[in-house]
Image (spheres, rainbow, N blue to C red):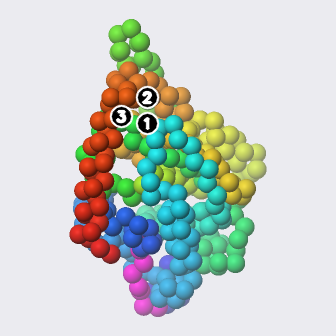
Amino acid sequence: MICAYCGKEAKGTKEHIISSGILGLFPECFATIDGERSIVHQGEPMVKDVCADCNNNRISYIDSYAKEFIEKYFLVKYKKDDTLSVEYDYTMIQKMCLKFAFNDLRARKKDVSFFDDEVKEFLLNEEKSSPLGNITILAGLAVNTSPALDYMFGNMKLRWGDSPLLLANSIVTNIDYNTGHITLREERKIQEFENYALSYVFRFNSLQLLILCWDRDIKEDVLNKNNIILKYQYPYSILDASGNTVLSRCTSEATYHHEQLIDVTWGQGLMDEISYMRGTFSEQSEKYFEEVQKRWDEEERKLAEEHPR
Ligand SMILES: [Zn+2]
């Protein structure tokens, strides 16, 4: 076997797609739900084309950071108007997203051409501490503001997938406040970006991350244009080398359970209006939701005990 990272001929070892340190933070999520292939299995998602040296020595520093970052901020749930100031190592966040995406793409036998020698070297080499210029990462808080509580789907704290749908315009076009009639956009147009190469979405409990990878030769003005669209069109914060960003909610009742669907900022606002009209945000509803969530949390604690890692 040729190692997917270093390219040397060696015996393949099992590498976790999402690091085992992160899986270990959520033992209650013991089943893997693969929506794309419509299968549920109890094993941990793995890929077996990495040599022992890369797996155990060379790329494991990325997993350590990923676990530390998730554990620090995202084991808890947030409320709809919460904001969270996070400190992070931007290069390590890039490496974490790239590594998980690369592993997942190989497991699904998809196109990995973005991961050329330079990107692999970036991942393998802990000393490489400057971020890649042709990558944009957006982050936000995943908060359930829908009337469909978490227990209804269960076990969905960890999710990921390639090519999330970044909409070009809102899902809802109009709300008639007199009648409550909601008009949906007939055709969902996807936002196009120049020099787009690859994108991924990750959900780690209350954190949602989007990584957009651009062609290596993307010109600075095109990159700036893409980043301006991303910044103003989506309810996410762009992470950068400053290592300090304030996150706020990036989900609505329409997108919380569908991490692949990225609504625009004004679309999220319209969805919030609907939640408000529906009464989801009323004090009484919130109290009821809180009570049900508490019971689900207890159930999850039991599941975690039954499935120690
Ligand atoms: Zn290797």
Compared to residue 67, the image places residue 280 above or below, namely above
Residue 59 to residue 206: above or below: below
As drawn, is 128 to the left or to the right of 58?
A: right
SS category of the residue bearing label 1: loop
Extent of the magenta region: 10-18
* Residue 155 horizontal/vertical position (percent): 30, 56
- The residue labelled by disc 1 is 252
Residue highlighted by disc 3: 286
* Mark 2 surroundings within 10 Å by alpha-carbon count, few (fewer than 14), some (14 through 19), many (20 or more): many
Q: Earlier in the sequence, mark 1 or mark 3?
A: 1
Q: Position of residue 91 (x, y in %)?
A: 66, 65
Query: Relative to the observer, which residue lies in front, 305 or 123?
Result: 305
Disc 1 residue type? Ser
Assess mark 3: CB under 8 A from ligand 1?
no
Q: Which residue is mark 2?
A: 271
Quadrant including the C terminus? bottom left
Task: Report x, y in % for residue 246.
Answer: 63, 47
The answer to the question of whether label 1 and label 2 lie on touching residues, with beta carbons closer than 8 A, is yes
Q: What is the three-letter code of the residue carrying label 2?
A: Met
